[in-house]
Amino acid sequence: MTLRYRYKLFLLITVFLFPGILIAQVPGETVQKAKDFLSLLENQKFEEATDYFAPIVYNQLPASRLKDIWIQINNQVGSFEKLVRNRTETMKNWNVVYLTCKFEKSLLDLKLVFSEEEKITGIFFVPSKPEVEYQLPPYAIKNNYEENPLKVISGSYELPGTLTIPKNKDSFPLIVFVHGSGPNDRDETIGPNKMFKDLSTGLASMGIATLRYDKRTFVYREADDFITPEPETIEDAQAAILLGGQVPGVSEVLILGHSLGAYLLPVIATGQENLKGMIMMAGNARPLEDLILEQFTYLLSQNGMTPEEVQTFDDIKTRVSRVKSENLTEDTMRDLLPLNIPASYWMYLKNYEPVKTLKKLKIPVLVLQGERDYQVTMKDFDIWEKGLSRKKNINFRSYEKLNHLFMEGKGKSNPQEYSIPSHAAHYVIEDIVNWVEEQK
């Protein structure tokens, strides 16, 4: 699981999530306010910057926390250098301004969402939108598949999705995709990369259908207060499994989870009688709070920590300790906990034992892990392998050159490589296809 838990790629503060984009003109005054806000961050005038916040943001993101976030961003991608460009969008009643910022090591977009009252209701640091459009991987053979829109109906929610079906086949298996943490779209877009789009088109080119959908927290603003993993991830994945079984020509339904999705696959699969197999990609076996602390340690210690970063790290450790504490209750304020995730979410995970839950399942399982992954590491892979070594229905495979997105690289992995256009490794797709064929 990645630090993108409500944070997209780097450290991200999310107060509201917003539905579909509409075309309209954002006032120039709003763009200027966004630029002024960035200038205050650059000059470390954090108290003045919070004057731009709507009350709910001001309460959850005081000047001290805003300062911590800015320090952490600078630690990860270097010092801020200049504003490169800006672009705008509208989302129903909100105006959105993207400020593309050049830092020493990377480009990042500062995404600011403004209310009708011209107050900031959402602040994000996300990978900059690439200058070039996403290109299909070379192993995607367009003549071998077709893509059709569909909707996953989960309770009162409608989630737009895509069904990718191999051509010229009367019968085929279908794999449902379950996203990693954060408000992911159906392609699991991160910067210029689309891991799920790669996997989907690659698998369909080789005869396996896929079903992928936009995450609830990506589509609906109110879903940001997801309370537990059930409405945030589990319910929608189970609804997608049922939908997949109704697609004409589908011989069997399997499920693939990445990161948080893989971590939750054992509970998602429990009781799903029509599910014939599951693929876990970079799923953590350890508690989420342990990974958060480990990731911060990894990122902050690469070049040595400044006094400010030491203070930030101490704050993170304190927040993690609150999750571990027996005194944690649903009334514990979320702004006292890691990543501002509600206490109810942490309490749910306290009672979740993924290895133990997976042991009870009899369906075939494929566990995949990139050995360069610093977000979910080989420690987790080893825990899965050791805890499930006697289960003959589970297979394990790791890849020396791959990172958290199953894309190749060299040396130590870091967040900056996610901004480099790449594709999920073809041999991972081949391994999945071969494994699915072996289960028949």
Image (cartoon, helix red, strand yellow):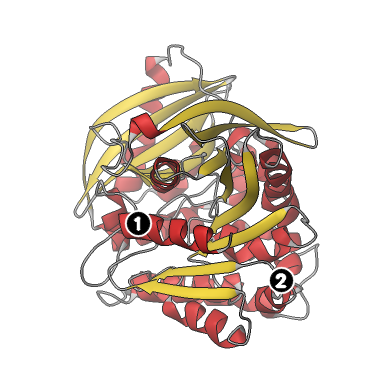
Quarter in which the C terminus is drawn: bottom right
Q: State left or right for residue 369 relative to residue 60.
A: left
Q: Circle 1 sits on which residue?
A: 73
Of residue 227 and residue 321, the one placed in the foreground of this image is 227
Look at 44% across and 60% down and name the residue there: 434
Judged from the image, the secondary structure of the residue bearing numbered disc 2 is: loop
> Residue 39, image x and y in percent?
31, 39
Q: Check disc 2: other Cα within 10 Å, few if <14, some if 14-19, many if 20+.
A: some
Q: Check disc 1: other Cα within 10 Å, few if <14, some if 14-19, many if 20+.
A: some
Q: Circle 2 sits on which residue?
A: 362
1 or 2: tag closer to the N-terminus: 1
Say which mark, if any, is on residue 431.
Answer: none
Residue 365 appearing in the image = yes
> Residue 363, image x and y in percent?
68, 66
Quadrant assignment, res 344: bottom right
Judged from the image, the secondary structure of the residue bearing numbered disc 1 is: helix
> Residue 134, image x and y in percent?
30, 35
The residue type indicated by label 1 comes to: Ile
The residue type indicated by label 2 comes to: Lys
> Residue 67, image x and y in percent?
42, 56
Could you give the CA–CA distance between mark 1 and mark 2, rounded to whole angstroms?
A: 44 Å
Look at 41% across and 76% down and name the residue there: 297
Of residue 280 and residue 226, the one placed in the foreground of this image is 280
Which residue lies most toward the top here?
A: 24
Of residue 410 and residue 224, the one placed in the foreground of this image is 410
Look at 35% across and 29% down and name the residue there: 143
